[in-house]
Image: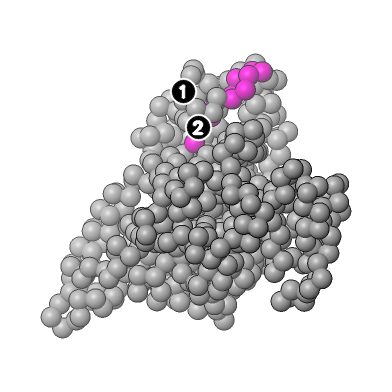
């Protein structure tokens, strides 16, 4: 009997006892030593009885407290990714960013090998667990797989917000600055817990205004840094974001959207869309906006956000609604990941500005330009830079036929369809279920197109999908912000919207009723 299916990190345990209750094989019980937080943690008391059902892992509410290591053999026996996350796509994979590639040999080192593995005593080399706060093979991008020839993944059950922090550390993020706000607070909380043990910096700023300017400072030195907030905090950050966009300072800003305006409530909305996608600060600028729809994508897109930020020297926003931030899902993370931090170090120190003068040091970063023609020229260059960013635009397209499983081949077109539903975030997940139900009920074909980037959007790439649809239905948790943008390249007479706000999401039933009518 395998005795090493799961691992409990006693320092993250809050002693709720849910795992002990969930385990029907009596494997878990209470430890004998309190942890640093003052709790008596759960521990494995009868490892030989464990059958690897992972009920404890899925029951534990603490991120990365109970984890398991999956070998290829284990994964083969599971549905792909173990859940519907697989349907929600993997931006990294689509970007040609092979998540299985090893980091440069010798560069990041093999922390597991250096620090040992608590589970080695079980003599099960294929089942060694990652000690996230001490060995950190995930967080350090160490190349364990290449050594034993067995690609493995870390299975965790976590909120989308938790996956953001894991993704940031896996990307090589070295600093977090933030001010907690619901429904984004777990990001600041996790950063305070996890960054220090990964050798990174996490600071609770005195305000969102302070946080965004700390991000500016860190990005200006070539440090991979991140902040996270929700709508009211993002409003305060617009000043700093405008300066970062003007000075081409890289950094990642996470917005877990709540309902507004004003304080509103903590329900999910997508009404920060316009503020982020159209550039909410002063002056005319854009920042790339990624729109994850699962915990898996919260992880992948965070890594991708750092890549884009440093490759294009720009702030990047991850825009997710409260549903995606708060939803708990299983997540298989490859144990070995390419280090996005390699990109950052390749960019540092930044090249001298082309407009450096003898009076200024070439590395001084300033956005002040009192000569109108000169500023206009810089804006020309900025918008030419935005044209080059078109290549990062991503979307996922899926068709739904009556009583037929959807074809998950990436973005495959099969036939003309009745209605193309366009939605992002939680609305896209609801729309997928609605499209299948409507196809069965109305005996028509429907499709869902989910933008994974909200800026840029490549209208030309959408064209083959749009032209096959009789109607376009845009589902969003706001009053039609994205639909207004899509009208730039979609005939408005074919387009209608299903919109909810106030913290309410559209239901499957109401989308089905519209599609099938
Ligand atoms: S994996 Fe299943 S059997 Fe093993 S400790 Fe967890 S709940 Fe118990
Ligand atoms: S469910 Fe998680 S937090 Fe609760 S006692 Fe078990 S390990 Fe600890």
In the rendered structure, are the residues bearing label 1 and label 2 in contact, judged by CB atoms less than 8 Å apart? yes
Horizontally, is 195 left or right of 507 in the view? left
Residue 446: horizontal and vertical position, in percent? 58, 25
Tell which circle, 1 or 2, labels the residue nearer the N-terminal end. Answer: 2
Task: Give the magenta part as a residue range.
Answer: 396-406
The answer to which quarter of the image holds residue 190 is bottom right
For the N terminus, which image quadrant?
A: top right
Q: Is residue 313 visible?
A: yes
For the C terminus, which image quadrant?
A: top right
Residue beneath disc 1: 413
Horizontally, is 479 left or right of 386 in the view? right
Residue 264 badge:
none
Horizontally, is 8 left or right of 27 in the view? left
Look at 53% across and 66% down and name the residue there: 115
Beta carbon of the mark 2 residue lies under 8 A of ligand 1:
no
Q: Secondary structure at mark 2?
A: strand
In terms of depth relative to the viewer, which is nearer, 225 or 169? 169
Tell me the CA gap for discs 1 and 2: 8 Å
Residue 397 badge:
2
Q: Is residue 188 visible?
A: no
Residue 467: horizontal and vertical position, in percent? 43, 25
Residue 313: horizontal and vertical position, in percent? 33, 62
């Amino acid at each position: 009997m395998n005795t090493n299916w799961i691992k409990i990190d006693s320092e993250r345990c809050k002693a709720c006892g849910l795992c002990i209750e969930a385990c029907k094989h009596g494997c878990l019980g209470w430890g004998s030593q309190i942890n640093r937080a003052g709790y008596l943690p759960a521990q494995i008391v009868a490892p030989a009885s464990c059958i690897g059902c992972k009920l404890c892992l899925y029951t534990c509410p603490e991120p990365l407290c109970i984890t398991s290591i999956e070998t290829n053999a284990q994964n083969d026996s599971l549905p792909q990714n173990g859940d519907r996350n697989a349907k929600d796509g993997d931006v990294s994979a689509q970007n040609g960013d092979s998540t299985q590639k090893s980091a440069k040999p010798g560069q990041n080192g093999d922390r597991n090998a250096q620090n040992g593995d608590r589970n080695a005593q079980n003599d099960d080399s294929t089942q060694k667990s990652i000690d996230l706060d001490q060995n950190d093979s995930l967080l350090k991008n160490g190349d364990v797989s290449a050594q034993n020839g067995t690609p493995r993944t870390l299975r965790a059950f976590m909120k989308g917000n938790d996956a953001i922090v894991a993704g940031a550390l896996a990307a090589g993020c070295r600093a977090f600055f933030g001010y907690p706000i619901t429904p984004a607070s777990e990001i600041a909380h996790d950063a305070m817990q996890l960054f220090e043990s990964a050798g990174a910096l996490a600071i609770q700023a005195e305000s969102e205004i302070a946080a965004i300017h700390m991000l500016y400072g860190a990005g200006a030195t070539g440090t991979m840094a991140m902040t996270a907030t929700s709508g009211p905090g993002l409003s305060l950050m617009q000043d700093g974001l405008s300066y970062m966009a003007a000075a081409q300072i890289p950094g990642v800003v996470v917005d877990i959207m709540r309902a507004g305006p004003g304080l509103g409530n903590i329900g999910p909305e997508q009404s920060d869309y316009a503020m982020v996608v159209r550039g909410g600060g002063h002056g005319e600028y854009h920042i790339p906006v990624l729109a994850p729809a699962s915990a898996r994508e919260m992880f992948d897109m965070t890594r991708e956000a750092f890549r884009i930020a440093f490759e294009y020297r720009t702030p990047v926003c991850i825009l997710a609604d409260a549903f995606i931030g708060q939803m708990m899902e299983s997540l298989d993370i490859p144990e070995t990941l390419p280090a996005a931090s390699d990109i950052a170090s390749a960019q540092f120190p930044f090249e001298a500005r082309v407009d450096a003068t003898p009076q200024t040091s070439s590395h001084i970063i300033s956005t002040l330009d009192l000569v109108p023609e000169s500023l206009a020229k810089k804006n020309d260059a900025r918008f030419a830079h935005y044209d080059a960013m078109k290549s990062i635009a991503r979307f996922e397209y899926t068709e739904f036929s009556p009583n037929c499983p959807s074809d998950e081949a990436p973005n495959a077109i099969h036939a003309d369809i009745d209605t193309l539903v366009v939605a992002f975030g939680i609305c896209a997940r609801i729309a997928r279920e609605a499209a299948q139900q409507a196809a069965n009920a109305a005996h028509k074909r429907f499709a869902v197109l989910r933008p994974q980037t909200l800026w840029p959007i490549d209208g030309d790439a959408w064209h083959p999908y749009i032209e096959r649809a009789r109607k376009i239905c845009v589902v969003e948790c706001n009053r039609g912000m994205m639909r207004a943008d899509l009208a730039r390249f979609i005939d408005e007479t074919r387009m209608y919207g299903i919109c909810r706000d106030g913290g309410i999401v559209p239901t499957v039933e109401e989308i089905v009723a519209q599609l099938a009518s």
